[in-house]
């Protein structure tokens, strides 16, 4: 009977110990869950910061440092924040002057987080800080920072913080608390050696017998975990994080206490049964034993009271943690939400009013689906959650504003499971991306306009990155490769060319980037000819990161130019032959003319006295015709020599040349009573010219003005000049008989006359010579005239100041 009583008492005592262990584990779970919840909240805030500050680098941005300081203020700086670049370089935030640079490429949180998609959280194995020397675990997340690549942000949870969480539980000197990762890696343990941290305990009874059957429970272990002491162990996995908590006490201490209390009970029963047989002294001894048992009960009562007080302290701490979390949520720009398994909203942050116009009271208790603007967005979100393992990052959809219009938001959400693995709701954050969508729309419109513009061009046009990735291309260029613009976008330009051509294009592109200047070159492919230009394109930071190409098909133009070149060569050859012919002809023609003139003179001397009046007149007519013919030949000879026999064109002053021409005409000026004026206010004019031809030019023009004078007034000739757009423009104005407009072009033809020879002498070649001289000097000549009033001839000559030394 006594044995049965002892066994029953021992079993009851063990159940009490198991319940106590479970309570202590729950206390630890609440503490650990609070630590990781605060950490996750900060990582979500860091992700949102990157989204809200596109292009800015959190490693050196004061705004991100302020976010970290606020987090450390809330957590009393118990957790440290670090950033890691793609190459493993470690950055302290806020930056600590004098801190040693470190590289963590060997850390598991770097390797594993770089494998994870952006937004996933990774909990590392324990590591010893290289700068602090303290042991910690990292809760890490990869951020995708535009223009700066991947950046890992992690919070280092030091062992001291976890020890504080473990201290909330009372497990006795032979008890222990362990925090493990779901894969069995030991993250932390109360009163353990650093060498034990990071051990793989996946072969322990918790993972082989306990967790496969239930999320939580109590096990009797032999040689458990790290210390080899058999224990009564309470274990449980956290529903929201891949963590396992184990709280145990020595199995020997449990048995000792149970058997001691049991035997005291047996002793008490024995005393009661034999009470009548005992002496007074024996009764007094029994009374002392009962007093001792009463004292033990009082001690147990005190322990229970202490546990109650500690649990109240835990609740206060949890309330404070919850208040801190609420403060963070209420100050977030993003909207945090959580739904229950029925889809109703159970938590919503105050910022929902800024984004959707609803108050917290409007949303709480309502179905989350009611706030989606359309079914399509809701269905796409559900499909994305299912396809991505129950989580999405920066998923765009439209939600309904209180005023009824849609609001574009980006949400990062994940499914929440309870401790038994059943669906418990959805949790996440969302933020308004209306501005981003407006910018995207503007960019699409801009891109469409640019595409329309480049497709309107007849030139082939393309924009590509320095590695050859094609960003934009028009239909003209795409057609050269037998593709559409859509097929070429995103492909590599170098792959479209033969290797040797691709290498030459890479060299040209590198030269453009290096010098910052465009490169122009001609490209011949078979019978096709292209005129190509490569231009640098700089980003907002001024760095050249793209290249634009403009290519014009000049095949037809090249063929035309080649034909024109052949025609010009043929014309030049013909002109040379004509000039040679004119020279030879004019030279050979003068010989018979001289002979005719000589014999006519001889006839007049010998037979002049024998000729009657008509004979002498006929003889004079013949001699005059021969003389005029000789003058025509001389003028033709001069005309042919303008291009072939001219002097070099050099820098020269014009005014002295004009005065030399006036000197040659001194007799004609005096006899006609003409007045020739030069406007000295025009200054000196230095032109590029052949001095003899310039003299002949002004001599012909001034001579014509004297010759074709008006009979009723003495001739007046005014010369002026001015510099216009790098050329000197001269005007020679007279008050002569004028010219009808229909003859403005004709008078520059060779041997062209507007009047009979008996009225105005001349061969009709003077203005033709003027035009040829002006054209040889790269200028032009024209006139303005009014019949009976006068004529003004205009001509241009190049300014010598605009020609570099040795330019002619």
Image (cartoon, grey):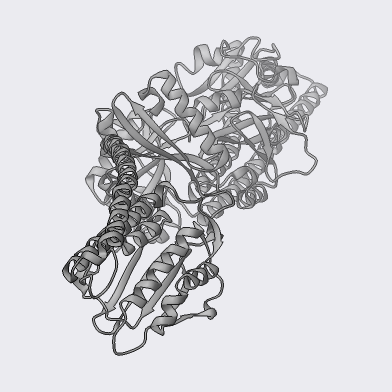
In the depicted view, which residue is nearer to us: 59 or 666? 666
Position of residue 326 relative to residue 273, above or below, is: below
Residue 696: percent from left, percent from top: 43, 63
In the picture as drawn, the residue positioned furthest to the right comes out as 281
Count of labels in the image: 0
At 56% from the left edge and 71% from the top edge, which residue is drawn? Answer: 684
**In the rendered image, which quarter is residue 35 located in?**
top right
At 38% from the left edge and 54% from the top edge, which residue is drawn? Answer: 638
Position of residue 592 relative to residue 284, above or below, is: below
**In the rendered image, which quarter is residue 613 located in?**
bottom left
| Residue 12 visible in image | yes
In the depicted view, which residue is nearer to us: 615 or 350? 615
Relative horizontal placement of residue 747, taking residue 129 as reference (left or right): left
> Quick one: quadrant of the N terminus?
top right
In the depicted view, which residue is nearer to us: 537 or 505? 505
Relative horizontal placement of residue 371, taking residue 123 as reference (left or right): left
At 51% from the left edge and 56% from the top edge, which residue is drawn? Answer: 330
Position of residue 792 relative to residue 807, above or below, is: below
In the depicted view, which residue is nearer to us: 305 or 675? 675
Residue 787: percent from left, percent from top: 23, 81
Residue 28: percent from left, percent from top: 61, 33
């Amino acid at each position: 009977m006594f044995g049965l009583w002892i066994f029953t008492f021992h079993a009851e005592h063990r159940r009490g110990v198991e319940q106590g262990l479970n309570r202590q584990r729950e206390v630890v779970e609440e503490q650990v869950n609070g630590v990781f919840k605060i950490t996750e909240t900060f990582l979500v805030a860091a992700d949102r910061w990157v989204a809200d500050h596109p292009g800015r680098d959190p490693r050196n941005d004061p705004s991100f440092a302020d976010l970290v300081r606020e987090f450390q203020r809330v957590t009393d700086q118990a957790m440290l924040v670090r950033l890691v670049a793609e190459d493993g370089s470690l950055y302290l935030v806020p930056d600590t002057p004098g801190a040693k640079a470190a590289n963590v490429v060997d850390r598991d949180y770097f390797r594993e987080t770089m494998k994870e998609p952006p937004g996933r959280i990774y909990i590392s194995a324990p590591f010893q800080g290289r700068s602090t020397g303290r042991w910690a675990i990292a809760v890490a997340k990869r951020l995708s920072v535009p223009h700066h690549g991947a950046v890992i942000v992690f919070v280092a949870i030091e062992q001291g913080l976890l020890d504080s969480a473990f201290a909330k539980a009372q497990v006795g000197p032979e008890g222990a608390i362990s925090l493990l990762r779901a894969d069995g890696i030991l993250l932390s343990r109360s009163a353990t050696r650093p060498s034990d941290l990071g051990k793989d305990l996946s072969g322990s009874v918790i993972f082989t017998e306990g967790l496969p059957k239930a999320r939580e429970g109590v096990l009797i272990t032999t040689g458990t975990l790290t210390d080899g002491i058999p224990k009564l162990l309470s274990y449980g996995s956290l529903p929201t994080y891949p963590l396992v908590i184990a709280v145990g006490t020595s199995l020997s201490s449990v048995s000792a206490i149970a058997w001691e209390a049991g035997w005291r009970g047996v002793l008490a029963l024995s005393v009661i049964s034999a009470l009548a047989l005992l002496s007074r002294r024996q009764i007094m001894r029994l009374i002392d034993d009962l007093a001792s048992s009463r004292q033990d009960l009082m001690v147990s009562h005190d322990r229970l009271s202490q546990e109650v007080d500690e649990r109240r302290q835990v609740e206060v701490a949890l309330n404070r943690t919850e208040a801190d979390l609420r403060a963070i949520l209420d100050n977030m720009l993003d909207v945090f939400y959580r739904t229950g398994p029925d889809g109703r909203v159970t938590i919503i942050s105050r910022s929902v009013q800024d984004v959707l116009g609803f108050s917290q009271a409007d949303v709480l208790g309502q179905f989350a689906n009611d706030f989606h603007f359309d079914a399509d967005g809701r269905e796409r979100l559900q499909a994305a959650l299912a396809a991505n393992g129950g989580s999405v990052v920066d998923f765009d959809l439209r939600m309904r504003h209180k005023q009824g219009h849609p609001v574009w938001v980006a949400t990062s959400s994940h499914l929440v499971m309870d401790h038994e693995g059943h669906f418990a709701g959805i949790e996440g954050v969302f933020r308004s991306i209306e501005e981003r969508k407006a910018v995207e729309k503007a960019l699409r419109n801009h891109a469409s306009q640019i595409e329309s513009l480049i497709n309107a061009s007849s030139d082939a046009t393309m924009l590509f990155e320095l590695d050859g990735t094609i960003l934009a291309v028009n239909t003209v260029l795409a057609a050269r490769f037998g593709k559409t613009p859509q097929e070429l976008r995103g492909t590599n330009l170098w792959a479209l060319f033969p290797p040797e051509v691709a290498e030459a294009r890479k060299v040209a592109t590198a030269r453009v980037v290096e010098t910052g200047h465009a490169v122009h070159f001609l490209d011949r492919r078979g019978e096709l000819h292209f005129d190509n230009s490569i231009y640098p394109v700089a980003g907002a930071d001024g760095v050249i990161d793209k290249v634009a190409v403009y290519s014009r098909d000049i095949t037809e133009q090249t063929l035309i130019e080649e034909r024109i070149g052949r025609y010009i060569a043929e014309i030049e050859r013909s002109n040379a032959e004509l000039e040679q012919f004119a020279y030879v002809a004019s030279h050979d023609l003068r010989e018979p003319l001289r002979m005719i003139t000589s014999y006519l003179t001889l006839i007049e001397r010998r037979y002049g006295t024998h000729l009657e009046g008509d004979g002498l007149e006929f003889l004079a007519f013949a001699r005059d015709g021969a003389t005029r013919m000789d003058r025509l030949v001389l003028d033709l000879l001069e005309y042919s020599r303008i291009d072939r026999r001219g002097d070099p064109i050099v820098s020269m002053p014009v005014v002295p040349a004009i005065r030399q021409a006036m000197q040659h005409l001194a007799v004609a000026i005096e006899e006609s009573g003409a007045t020739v004026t030069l406007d000295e206010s025009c200054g000196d004019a230095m032109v590029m010219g052949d001095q003899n031809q310039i003299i002949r030019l002004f001599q012909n023009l001034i001579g014509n003005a004297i010759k074709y004078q008006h009979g009723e007034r003495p001739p007046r000739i005014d010369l002026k000049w001015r510099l216009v757009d790098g050329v000197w423009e001269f005007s020679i104005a007279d008050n002569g008989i004028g010219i009808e407009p229909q003859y403005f072009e004709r008078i520059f033809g060779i041997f062209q006359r507007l009047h009979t020879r008996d009225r105005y002498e001349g061969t009709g070649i003077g203005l033709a010579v003027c035009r040829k001289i002006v054209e040889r000097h790269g200028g032009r000549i024209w006139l303005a005239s009014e019949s009976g009033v006068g004529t003004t001839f205009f001509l241009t000559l190049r300014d010598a100041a605009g020609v570099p030394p040795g330019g002619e």
